[in-house]
Image (cartoon, rainbow, N blue to C red):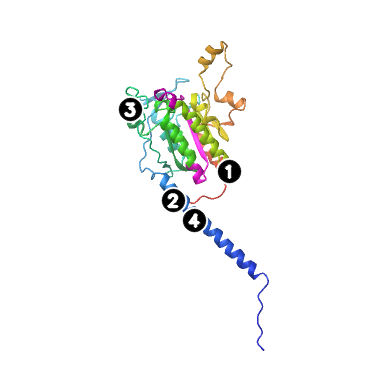
């Protein structure tokens, strides 16, 4: 008589587990493909020879505005525009900041073109924008893209004070909002370096509306569980400081950065009182809990990489 071998009791369960694991693996693979497809659709190819942006002083000899120390401009570039004598952090172009921050060849600029915007037909406004585009290599006052910092991928947006003082008009407001939306879709953290004189007067009330628009984008991103890191640089003022610049989960600042809504002189004239020493500077704001930490520019890359590693959810698919 032929004996029939009985199946082990746990065989059906093992089969179900194997099938479920296979389904999850396929789902992860499909999700990774979707993310990579979205990444390619939302960004441009990395630039082979990216422009570096203009120097803060148009001469071969750089003079520190704080201590008067002079240094060749090529030496200041190596120092990331930090005075080696007094530590003063001088302005740096958005393109140079990105170049010094991200891993080489990893930055992919976000596709977000809003065209020429001149809602009030402000005289010579369009000509000025065209000239600045040629000089700075930027389309507008904000450079945004997806890049990696020590292997940690994030959406990175940098305001450029070299472009109309990084003022926020319709185009900048749209680029900030788009950066938040892409970060949410890709499941990436977002880092925004702020450097702005506030709203752009050439666009009137429409520039002020960008405060509500960008704040809503930041709120929606926060509710979706995204990590938002703001790095406030000199200066972060006006409508930018009164909106997305101060709505981050983690707020960092460069040493000596002016951060506030109105300038100190305007406030003193309004209230008729002398302000405290160092009022509205990064150190004062850190002392009063408005800024989480002050980080030197030459240490910023390592600090951001550390924060991203601590908050990473899972390994991201690579291109």
- Which residue lies under the disc numbered 1? 311
Find the distance from the CA under tag 4 to the CA under tag 1.
24 Å
Q: Which residue is mark 2?
A: 37
Q: Do labels 2 and 3 touch, CB within 8 Å?
A: no
- Residue that badge 3 annotates: 126
Coordinates of residue 105 in the picture (x, y in percent): 41, 44
Q: Residues within 10 Å of mark 4 (few under 14, many from 20)?
A: few
- CA gap, disc 2 to disc 1? 24 Å
Using the numbered discs, state the Cα–Cα distance from disc 3 to disc 1 in whole angstroms. Answer: 42 Å
Q: Residues within 10 Å of mark 2 (few under 14, many from 20)?
A: few
Q: Is residue 51 left or right of residue 301?
A: left
Nearest to N terminus: mark 4 or mark 1:
4
Which image quarter holds the N terminus? bottom right
Q: Is residue 109 above or below residue 36?
A: above
Q: Position of residue 108 (x, y in %)?
A: 42, 43
Name which of mark 2 and mark 3 comes first in the sequence. 2
x%, y% of residue 245? 52, 30
* Label 3 Cα crowd, 10 Å radius (few <14 / some 14-19 / many 20+): some
Residue 54 position, x and y percent, is: 37, 30
Q: Is residue 196 magenta?
A: yes
Are the two marked residues, 3 and 1, in contact with CB atoms closer than 8 angstroms?
no
| Of pointers 3 and 1, the one earlier in the residue sequence | 3
Which structural element holds mark 3?
Answer: helix
289 falls in the magenta region: no
User: Tag on residue 30?
Assistant: 4
- Labels 2 and 4: the sequence-earlier one: 4
Labels 4, 1: front one? 4
Quadrant in the rendering for residue 13: bottom right
Q: Residue at x 47, y 30 (%)?
A: 210
Q: Which residues are magenta?
A: 182-206
What separation in Å lies between label 3 and label 4 (alpha carbons)?
A: 45 Å
Give the mark nearest the N terminus, 2 or 1.
2
């Amino acid at each position: 008589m032929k004996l029939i071998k009985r199946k082990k009791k746990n065989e059906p369960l093992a089969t179900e587990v194997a099938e479920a694991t296979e389904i999850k693996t396929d789902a992860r693979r499909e999700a990774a493909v979707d993310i990579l497809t979205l990444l390619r659709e939302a960004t441009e190819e990395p630039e082979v020879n990216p422009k570096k942006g203009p120097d803060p002083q148009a001469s071969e000899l750089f003079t520190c505005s704080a201590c008067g120390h002079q240094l060749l401009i090529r030496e200041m570039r190596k120092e990331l525009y930090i005075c080696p004598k007094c530590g003063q952090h001088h302005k740096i172009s958005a393109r140079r900041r990105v170049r010094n921050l991200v891993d080489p060849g990893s930055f992919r600029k976000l596709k977000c073109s809003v065209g020429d915007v001149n809602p009030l037909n402000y005289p010579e406004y369009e000509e000025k924008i065209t000239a600045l585009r040629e000089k700075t290599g930027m389309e507008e006052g904000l450079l945004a893209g997806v890049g990696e910092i020590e292997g940690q991928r994030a959406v990175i947006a940098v305001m450029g004070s070299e472009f109309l003082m990084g003022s926020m008009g319709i185009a900048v407001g749209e680029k900030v909002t788009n950066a938040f939306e892409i970060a949410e879709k890709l499941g990436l953290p977002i880092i925004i370096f702020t450097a702005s004189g506030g709203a752009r007067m050439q666009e009137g009330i429409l520039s002020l509306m960008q405060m509500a628009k960008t704040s809503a984008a930041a709120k929606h991103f926060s509710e979706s569980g995204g990590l938002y890191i703001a790095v406030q640089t000199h200066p972060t003022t006006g409508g930018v400081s009164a909106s997305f610049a101060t709505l981050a989960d983690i707020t960092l600042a460069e040493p000596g950065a002016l951060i506030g809504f109105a300038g100190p002189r305007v406030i003193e004239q309004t209230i008729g009182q002398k302000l405290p020493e160092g009022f509205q500077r990064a150190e004062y704001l850190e002392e009063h809990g408005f800024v989480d930490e002050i980080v030197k520019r030459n240490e910023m890359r390592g600090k951001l990489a550390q924060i991203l590693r601590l908050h990473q959810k899972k390994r991201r698919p690579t291109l």
